[in-house]
Amino acid sequence: MDNSPISGLVSVVVPTHNRSKMLRKAIKSILAQDYDKIELIIVQDACTDDTSAVLMEFKDSRIKSMVSDINLGGANARNLGI
């Protein structure tokens, strides 16, 4: 039984720019939470590394991905995800 005071969907927005190694760790941490009614929105902020390949490793319907072709910076990329 879920004793969490949260009852609805929680959106987690993660902007990233060429941090694929850190992204893998962040995704694993978010998906490992006890509360599972989440959507994980990854905003690829003009990534030129293997971020897309890292995302393809995860077969989880809670993960959504957005791509910006121009570098927005952390705050603007987060706003895009929101």
Image (cartoon, rainbow, N blue to C red):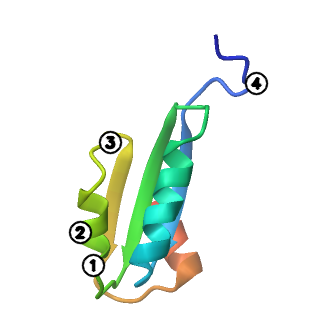
- The residue to which callout 4 is attached is 5
Q: Position of residue 19 (x, y in %)?
A: 45, 80
Question: In the rendered image of this protein, does residue 54 appear above or below residue 34?
Answer: below
**Nearer-N-terminus badge (4/1):** 4
Tag 4 secondary structure: loop
Query: Nearer the viewer's eye, disc 4 or disc 1?
Result: 1
Q: Position of residue 54 (x, y in %)?
A: 30, 66
Tag 3 secondary structure: loop
Report the amino acid beneath label 1.
Answer: Asp
**Alpha-carbon distance for marks 4 and 2?**
35 Å
The quarter of the picture where residue 57 lies is bottom left
Image marks 1 and 2: residues in contact by CB distance under 8 Å: yes
Q: Position of residue 10 (x, y in %)?
A: 57, 40
**Nearer-N-terminus badge (3/1):** 1
**Alpha-carbon distance for marks 4 and 1?**
37 Å
- The residue to which callout 2 is attached is 53
- The residue to which callout 3 is attached is 60
Question: In the rendered image of this protein, does residue 62 appear above or below residue 68?
Answer: above
**Alpha-carbon distance for marks 1 and 2?**
5 Å
Residue 63 showing in the rendered view? yes
**Nearer-N-terminus badge (3/2):** 2
- The residue to which callout 1 is attached is 50
Report the amino acid beneath label 3.
Answer: Asp
Q: Residue at x 54, y 42 (%)?
A: 32
Image marks 3 and 2: residues in contact by CB distance under 8 Å: no
Q: Name the residue nearer the viewer: 7 or 51.
A: 51
10 Å neighbourhood of mark 2: few (<14), some, or many (≥20)?
A: few
Report the amino acid beneath label 4.
Answer: Pro
Q: Is residue 31 left or right of residue 48?
A: right
Q: Is residue 79 left or right of residue 69?
A: right
Report the amino acid beneath label 2.
Answer: Ala
Q: Position of residue 8 (x, y in %)?
A: 59, 27
